[in-house]
Amino acid sequence: MAAKASDKYLVSAQLMQLVEKLRCVQGFSITEEVPDEKGGVVFKMTHDMSFNSWGENITVNLYPYNEQQTVVDILSKCSMPTQLFDMGQNKKNVKDILGYLLYGLTVQQMK
């Protein structure tokens, strides 16, 4: 099983505000953007190969919690299924995307 990292947050921002921010994220390629069954948006993204990994596939789920809050759920996993170690690259991907999305917003980590 490939190495992976994930995190989930409740953010004090409207869904469309985060969707617009995510469309502009630097360093990642958006390969797909589709609506989901919860009334939100699912982004499929990739990160290129580096010294730490053969590349990663990232899924970002954004869905409304209420009118003023949005759940951000991110999963980053190695694109090569046999890669067991990523030298922290997946955690870095999650941290970088969250940092970009959440800059200046109120955040609450979810379990």
Image (cartoon, grey):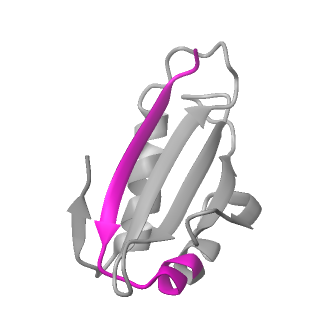
The answer to if 106 sits in the magenta stretch is: no
Give me the residue at 26% from left, 53% from top.
Answer: 110
Give me the residue at 58% from left, 72% from top.
Answer: 39
Q: How many marks?
A: 0
Residue 98 position, x and y percent, is 40, 61
In the image, is residue 39 above or below residue 3?
below
Q: Nearer the viewer, residue 3 or 19?
A: 19
Q: Quadrant of residue 67?
A: bottom left
The answer to if 18 sits in the magenta stretch is: yes
Task: Quarter of the image for the N terminus: give it.
Answer: top right
Residue 100 position, x and y percent, is 43, 69
Residue sitting farthest toward the front: 37
- Specify start and end residues of the magenta stretch as a single range: 1-19
Residue 61 position, x and y percent, is 54, 59
Give me the residue at 53% from left, 14% from top.
Answer: 84
Q: Nearer the viewer, residue 5 or 15?
A: 15
Q: Nearer the viewer, residue 71 or 55?
A: 71
In the image, is residue 25 above or below residue 66?
above
Residue sitting farthest toward the right: 31
In the image, is residue 46 above or below residue 61?
above
Q: Quadrant of residue 19?
A: bottom right
Q: Seen in the image, is 23 located left or right of residue 93?
A: right
Residue 14 position, x and y percent, is 43, 85
In the image, is residue 58 above or below residue 52?
below
Give me the residue at 70% from left, 23% from top.
Answer: 80
